[in-house]
Image (cartoon, rainbow, N blue to C red):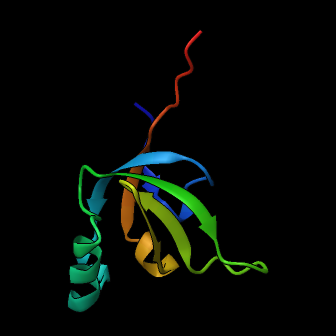
Amino acid sequence: MQPSTTLDLLSLKQRAEVVAIDWTAISENEGRRLRALGIDQGVSVEKLHKGMFGMNDPIALKVGRMMIAVRRSHARAISVCPIAVTTAA
């Protein structure tokens, strides 16, 4: 198992499992929104894109079959463990 990092530091096109969320760093309304979009402990996510022109906000994620956007400040509060991709030989 790889060491955990935060979602904002995850490499593009990298899949990861959410291992913890610092809900105190996110407002109650925004926390409800993230949960409604499927962001919670144990969920698999993939970082697809980040903002244009050197801006790292927002970050596009794949959660299940959905693509959602989260603020970088929220991504910083989400700890993830990268999932190693295995290829069939």
Residue shown at the point (48%, 80%) measured from the top left? 71
Residue 8 image offset from top left, x and y in percent = 53, 66
Q: Position of residue 20 (x, y in %)?
A: 27, 58
Q: How many marks are shown on the rendered structure?
A: 0
For the C terminus, the quadrant is top right
Q: Residue at x 43, y 47 (%)?
A: 16
Q: Nearer the viewer, residue 62 or 26?
A: 62
Left or right placement of residue 55 versus residue 58 in this view: right
For residue 50, which quarter of the picture?
bottom right
In the picture, measured across the screen, residue 58 lies left or right of residue 33, that is right
- Estimate the x, y position of residue 72 in percent, counting from the top left: 51, 77
Query: What x and y, as percent, mark residue 3?
Result: 44, 41
In this image, 13 relative to 43: left or right? right
Q: Residue at x 66, y 77 (%)?
A: 51
Q: Residue at x 53, y 69 (%)?
A: 60
Q: Which residue sits furthest right?
A: 53
Q: Residue furthest front?
A: 65
Quadrant placement of the N terminus = top left
Residue at the far top in the pictured view: 89
Q: Quadrant of residue 21?
A: bottom left
Instruction: Describe residue 73's horizontal placement relative to residue 89 as left or right.
Output: left
